[in-house]
């Protein structure tokens, strides 16, 4: 009985010691730095509930002990308990998945907080009509979430087949077909590739984006549609490729914000094909006057604007079409921000025959700033025609 009481006493003393040590250490550090004593801030404001909550948050944010222990706690949560927080989901075989992408597939939408398929369709149809008034064809290319193509990497024994797993995604694809909007269906393409030849990855294991193979397959699918349906004709430019190996730290790994990983530089080699203009002896670059404009998000940026450069979807599409193309890229902003940018850079619409609109699947519900109706500047050629008719 005495031993039990002694153990309890030691636990109580240890707990009290922890409670006392934290403010003492914090105060000592602040005095040594010549800063004000943060704990006394509680007496500098009226003791309202709002001020007390702000005071508590400030103590947590500026605590020396918390700031130094937090990285180790995050590492332990990730390494021992397989918990990546809100942004990262730990799958099998070292695979990481983007949390919002998984939520999109597995959770029903809160219609009061998120956009609906009807919102998406309304924005797409509005944009199509604006482009059609200028004689420009719209082609839509939703890029599958990584979770949709590799569901078995999430859970052992998963019976889900690769493809459009989300009801919202299937609904959007059906509506686009019903409205006769040209769509590059990468869900069917990637699922077919996995069924016939699954030896090469279409997505990066610790990144939310596609692999060099995935983007090349998407580029070929788009170019084949444009050429087979005579939306545009192949150009005459000559392109070459050269193999480039880059060391890439997966963006999901970076989202964990674990210094122990960042210090270890846990990068993986990725082999890309950098596209160059054989006739100009330089890497491929955008051409404002091109007949083709592509709008999209970070799936267009990876390997294109990142290392090694000119090895992403945009460069490979230019190579497949044998002509340079123009692009507007905004990370996470394919739903509305790229069209806002097009509104500001309306000169990019000139001379275009086709606009390709790429967006990642999860943005159907979670697109930044939703799916707004954004007006392009007035078509001056159309306005001149109207004036001529009035005369």
Image: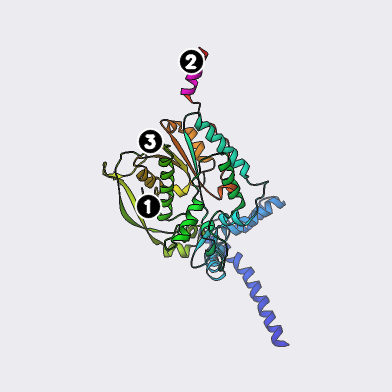
78 above or below 134? below
Q: Is residue 385 magenta?
A: yes
Instruction: Specify start and end residues of the magenta stretch as a single range.
Output: 381-387
Q: Is residue 255 magenta?
A: no
| Comes first in the chain, label 1 or label 2 | 1
Q: How many marks?
A: 3
- Secondary structure that dominates the magenta span: helix
Q: Position of residue 113 (x, y in %)?
A: 65, 47
Q: Residue at left 42%, top 30%?
A: 350
Q: Nearer the viewer, residue 204 or 11?
A: 204
Label of residue 307 in the image: 1
Quote the CA–CA distance across marks 1 and 3: 24 Å
| Comes first in the chain, label 1 or label 3 | 3
Which residue is identified by label 2? 388
Q: Are marks 1 and 2 in contact (CB under 8 Å)?
A: no
Q: Residue at left 59%, top 43%?
A: 175
Residue furthest to the top in view is: 391
Classify mark 1: residues with Cα within 10 Å, few (<14), some (14-19) or many (20+).
some
Q: Nearer the viewer, residue 380 or 298?
A: 380
């Amino acid at each position: 009985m005495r031993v039990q009481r002694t153990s309890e006493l030691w636990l109580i003393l240890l707990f009290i010691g922890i409670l006392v040590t934290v403010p003492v250490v914090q105060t000592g550090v602040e005095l040594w730095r010549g800063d004000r004593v943060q704990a006394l801030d509680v007496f500098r404001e009226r003791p309202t509930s709002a001020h007390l909550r702000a005071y508590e948050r400030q103590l947590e944010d500026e605590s020396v002990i918390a700031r130094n222990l937090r990285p180790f706690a995050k590492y332990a949560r990730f390494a021992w308990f397989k918990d990546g927080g809100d942004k990262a989901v730990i799958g099998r075989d070292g695979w990481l998945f983007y949390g919002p992408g998984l939520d999109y597939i597995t959770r029903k939408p809160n219609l009061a907080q998120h956009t609906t398929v009807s919102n998406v369709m309304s924005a797409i149809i509005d944009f199509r009509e604006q482009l059609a008034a200028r004689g420009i064809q719209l082609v839509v290319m939703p890029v599958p979430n990584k979770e949709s193509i590799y569901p078995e990497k999430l859970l052992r024994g998963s019976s889900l087949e690769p493809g459009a797993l989300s009801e919202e995604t299937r609904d959007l694809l059906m509506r686009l077909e019903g409205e006769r909007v040209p769509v590059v269906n990468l869900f069917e393409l990637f699922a077919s590739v996995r069924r016939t030849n699954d030896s090469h990855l279409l997505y990066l294991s610790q990144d939310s984006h596609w692999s060099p193979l995935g983007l090349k397959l998407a580029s070929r699918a788009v170019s084949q549609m444009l050429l087979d349906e005579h939306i545009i004709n192949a150009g005459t430019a000559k392109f070459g490729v050269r193999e480039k190996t880059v060391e890439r730290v997966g963006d999901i790994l970076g989202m964990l914000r674990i210094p122990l990983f960042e210090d270890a530089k846990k990068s993986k080699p990725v082999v890309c094909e950098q596209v160059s203009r054989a006739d100009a002896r330089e890497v491929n670059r955008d051409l404002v006057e091109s007949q083709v404009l592509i709008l999209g998000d970070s799936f267009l940026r990876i390997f294109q604007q990142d290392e090694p450069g000119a090895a992403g979807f945009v460069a490979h599409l230019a190579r497949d079409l044998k002509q340079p193309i123009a692009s507007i890229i905004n990370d996470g902003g394919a739903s509305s921000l790229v069209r806002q940018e097009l509104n500001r850079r309306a000169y990019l619409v000139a001379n275009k025959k086709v606009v390709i609109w790429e967006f990642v699947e999860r943005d159907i519900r979670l697109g930044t700033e939703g799916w707004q109706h954004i007006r392009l500047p007035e078509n001056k050629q159309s306005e001149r025609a109207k004036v001529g008719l009035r005369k």
